[in-house]
Amino acid sequence: MKVDFVTAVKLFFDNYANFKGRASRPEYWWAALFLFLVGLVLSFICGVLGLSQTATYCVSGVWDLAVLLPSLAIVVRRLHDVGKGGGYFFVILIPLIGFFWLLALLISPSQLQPNRFGPGPCEL
């Protein structure tokens, strides 16, 4: 199934705390774009309303807490899609290279065949 922006956002919230299964590359990156855009819009609105920096941090902090669990879940499902366990998320803790290692895993193509985490995505 082809995943567009709206479908990816729906899947992101439908699988709020689902750490099982797989998330295709488009599903992950469309959801990441959505989170980035919401962050920009929140910052813009806080600026237009003239909120203090502390209030802006509070607003963005509430949003960040609200999407923390689904964000972790979609990263784990994305790692499953490339054939890695969710524990690979912790490579981000390795100084200097951890972020780039995780990024490389997240941008890797999906394993089209079924793996131990479920059937392959139908993206072409």
Image (tube, rainbow, N blue to C red):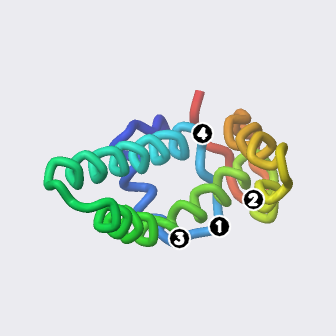
Do callouts 2 and 4 mark residues in contact (Cβ within 8 Å)? Answer: no
Query: How far across and how far down the image is residue 76, in percent?
Result: 67, 60
According to the image, label 2 marks what residue?
89
According to the image, label 3 marks what residue?
69
Q: Amino acid at mark 2?
A: Phe
Of badges 4 and 1, nearer the viewer stands: 4
Q: Earlier in the sequence, mark 3 or mark 1?
A: 1
Do callouts 4 and 1 mark residues in contact (Cβ within 8 Å)? Answer: no
According to the image, label 4 marks what residue?
25
Dividing the picture into quarters, in which one does residue 90 lie? Answer: bottom right
Q: CA distance from mark 3 to mark 1?
A: 13 Å
| 16 in relation to 111, above or below | below
Q: The residue tagged with tag 4: helix, strand or loop?
A: helix
Nearer-the-camera pick, 27 or 42: 42
Mark drawn on residue 20: 1
Q: Residues within 10 Å of mark 2 (few under 14, many from 20)?
A: some
Residue shown at 21% from the left, 60% from the top: 51
Dividing the picture into quarters, in which one does residue 89 lie? Answer: bottom right
Q: Earlier in the sequence, mark 2 or mark 1?
A: 1
Query: How far across and how far down the image is residue 94, in percent?
Result: 85, 55
Q: The residue tagged with tag 1: helix, strand or loop?
A: loop
Q: Earlier in the sequence, mark 3 or mark 4?
A: 4
Q: CA distance from mark 2 to mark 3?
A: 14 Å
Query: How far across and how far down the image is residue 21, in percent?
Result: 64, 61
Q: CA distance from mark 3 to mark 4?
A: 19 Å
Of badges 3 and 1, nearer the viewer stands: 3
Q: The residue tagged with tag 3: helix, strand or loop?
A: helix
Q: The residue tagged with tag 2: helix, strand or loop?
A: helix
Residue shown at 67% from the left, 45% from the top: 120
Nearer-the-camera pick, 78 or 50: 50
Residue situated furthest left in the rendering: 49
14 left or right, relative to 101: left
